[in-house]
């Protein structure tokens, strides 16, 4: 079976961000880019990294 690693599950994305499940769902509600496939949510890997860069605060 070929796995598509360009679309992350909730758990894979939260491991990258090092946050809990509730925090991940809150980010999705606040506008984190995601795709719904039926009842499942997937986060495009590139969109996640772009979102992270946009959230970075330069000091």
Image: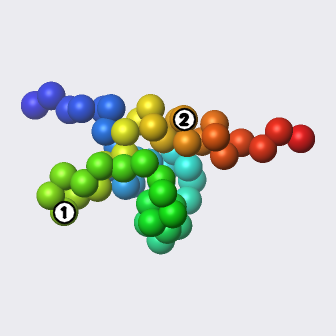
Question: Which residue is disc 1 drawn over?
Answer: 39
Residue in the foreground of this view, choosing between 43 and 9: 43
Residue at 64% over, 40% down: 54
What is the secondary structure assignment of the residue under circle 1? loop
Residue at 19% over, 63% down: 39
Image x and y of residue 11, in percent: 39, 54
Image x and y of residue 27, in percent: 51, 61
Residue at 31% over, 32% down: 5
Q: In this rendering, would 17 be left or right of 13?
A: right
Q: How is the image coloured?
A: rainbow
Image x and y of residue 15, in percent: 49, 49
- Whether 17 is drawn above or below 19: the answer is above
In this view, the residue farthest toward the right is: 59
Q: Badge 1 local density, few (<14 within 10 Å), some, or many (20+)?
A: few
Question: Which residue is disc 2 drawn over?
Answer: 50
Residue at 55% over, 59% down: 19
Q: In this rendering, would 53 be left or right of 1?
A: right
One can see residue 22 in this view:
yes
In this view, the residue farthest toward the front is: 31
In this view, the residue farthest toward the left is: 1
How far apart in space, not on screen, are marks 2 and 1 (Cα)? Answer: 24 Å
Screen quadrant of the C terminus = top right
What is the secondary structure assignment of the residue under circle 2? helix
Does label 2 or label 1 sit earlier along the sequence?
Answer: 1
Number of marks drawn: 2
For the residues labelled 2 and 1, say whether their Cβ atoms are less than 8 Å apart. Answer: no
């Amino acid at each position: 079976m070929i796995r598509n690693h360009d679309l992350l599950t909730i758990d894979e994305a939260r491991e990258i961000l090092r946050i809990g499940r509730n925090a991940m769902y809150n980010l999705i509600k606040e506008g984190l880019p995601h795709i719904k496939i039926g009842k499942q949510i997937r986060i495009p890997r590139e969109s996640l990294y772009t979102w992270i860069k946009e959230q970075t605060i330069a000091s």
